[in-house]
Image (tube, rainbow, N blue to C red):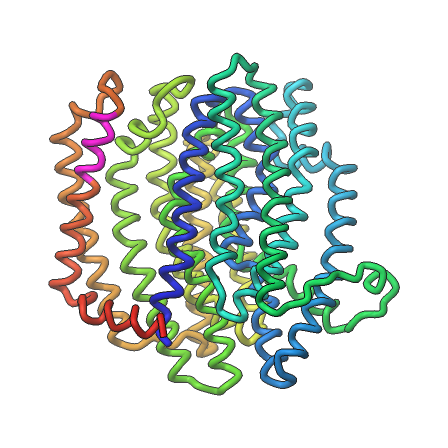
Amino acid sequence: MSLALPFTIVGSATLLSRVTGFLRDVLIAAMLGSGPVADIYVAAFLIPNLFRKMMSEGALNAAIVPRLARLEQEGGKQAARGFSDDVLSLMLVAVIVMIALAEFAMPQIMSALAIGFKASTAKFDDAVLFARIAFPFVGCVLLAALMSALLNTTERYAVAALVPLVLNLLLIGVLLALLLLPVERRDAGLALVTTVLIAGVVQLVLLWRATGRAGFDVTPRPLDAMTGRIDPGAKTLLLVALPGMMIAGSGHVHMIIASQFASLEPRAISWLYYADRLFQLPLGFVAAAVGVVLLPRLSKALNQDDRQMMAEAQSESFVFSSLLILPATVALIVLAKPITLVLFQRGAFGFVDVRATAAMLKVLAFALPAFVLIKVILPGFLAREEMRPPLIAVGIAIAANIATGLFFHHGGKWLAPAIGVAVGAWTNALVLLAMAIWKDRLNLLRSAIWRAAGAGLAAAIMGLLVGWMAVELKGFMQVSRPFAMKGAALMAICTSGLLVYLLAARLLGVFTVAALRKSTRSGAN
């Protein structure tokens, strides 16, 4: 069965989540601007958002999917489903303990996340309060991610991919109400972090029901977990899950490091946040689709000792990723300022914020191909439950990020965090690629490499067009113009660029309409 349809389902659901998340952040920008309350909200939501993003890209799959695939191959579906109940029971206990410890140690956690906040006692205290309200969302996300991983093992992707929309839809509703009411910014921030927690509970309930319908009992037994009356393999799995989450979610760890550097400069943490929201639109679509769909297929092929299936799955993922991420990279670099101006400049978000956010976005865009390359390579290791090589690559990349941030902080300062992310991402990708070639964990068909190169050339052609159009239509996107006019001009540029890219990619043989139809039909069967 082709991966085209699963990629489309997961990618489209994730893109919808990113689009609604972007709308949410446009409203947050209008409501909170880039001042102290915005910084506090971003910092308080940093860890919950980190876990949410990692889980949406299949971070927990790294530990659970290969193990369940092997259990099902050896002992049937009943063995896999019984084991999943033990894992759920242990995770529930771990989540309760984690939340209790985090609530107690939140001042120390916030000091580590945003050391610059300590210059203002009031700002730091509010950050601790906001974070304490939002943090239990992490527990909901972890439990929901386990249930999503269970659904992914049965290749039922739609519900797990759509559930993250709940958070964005609830926040958009609350923000619209807040914008219509005379509410202080601090009170608005408190309302938002409370909504985050409520959304986590709703998501968990929805996934719980979907997992039950898929045939899993999902009945936690916390007492058994605490007294040790549980499969020892489940404990081992959770220990493996920690490095698995670190590996699969390393891109978001880079953003945590970047936020630490950004907190040292006024408003920089907000600029980084808004740039990251734009950066996540294309990355979320591709990374989530590859991270969620490719691993179950490779695990299945590995258990069947089918090298051809593995090569075809990795090659299809590589072409799919290249076809989508390369034009997105070029577009964000060329159109960073017009996009930021049209979408964000209103209310408390001024021209200085536009210029700084656009500069950060350009730098982050260079990291897009690296992050996606990592997602394509990783399943070759994770399907075999090999954690050491990817962990080494992540460690080297984090060190490179920190070193780069320290070096550029003396010059660029507010731009240093974004530069560190880009350097860290490419370091991770190149080290991981070298290890994959050395250990024979990446098998790409020659045709896939040529098609990816064609996608790069088509993206470059598109970049020339959109760059020229951005200059010609600059007058229509001035801040004084109505939003409808600015939006129409930006839409015209993007649409023209997309059409030229598709035409160039088609002429270069990157894809054919017949092949797309065939893969979609085979994916539906």
- Locate residue 477 relative to residue 441 in the image: left or right: left
Q: Residue furthest front?
A: 213
Q: On the image, which quarter does residue 312 sit in?
A: bottom left
- Locate residue 260 relative to residue 124 in the image: left or right: left
Camera-nearest residue between 429 and 312:
312
- Locate residue 493 relative to residue 127 in the image: left or right: left
Indicate the quadrant containing the N terminus: top left, top right, bottom left or bottom right.
bottom left
Indicate the quadrant containing the C terminus: top left, top right, bottom left or bottom right.
bottom left
Q: Residue at position x 37%, y 28% from top?
A: 356
Q: Is residue 301 above or below residue 286?
A: below
The boundaries of the magenta stretch are 484-493
Count of number-bearing discs: 0
Q: On the image, which quarter does residue 125 sit in?
A: top right
User: Residue 121 location, x and y as percent?
Assistant: 68, 19
Q: On the image, which quarter does residue 458 sit in?
A: bottom left
Residue 454 sits inside the magenta stretch: no
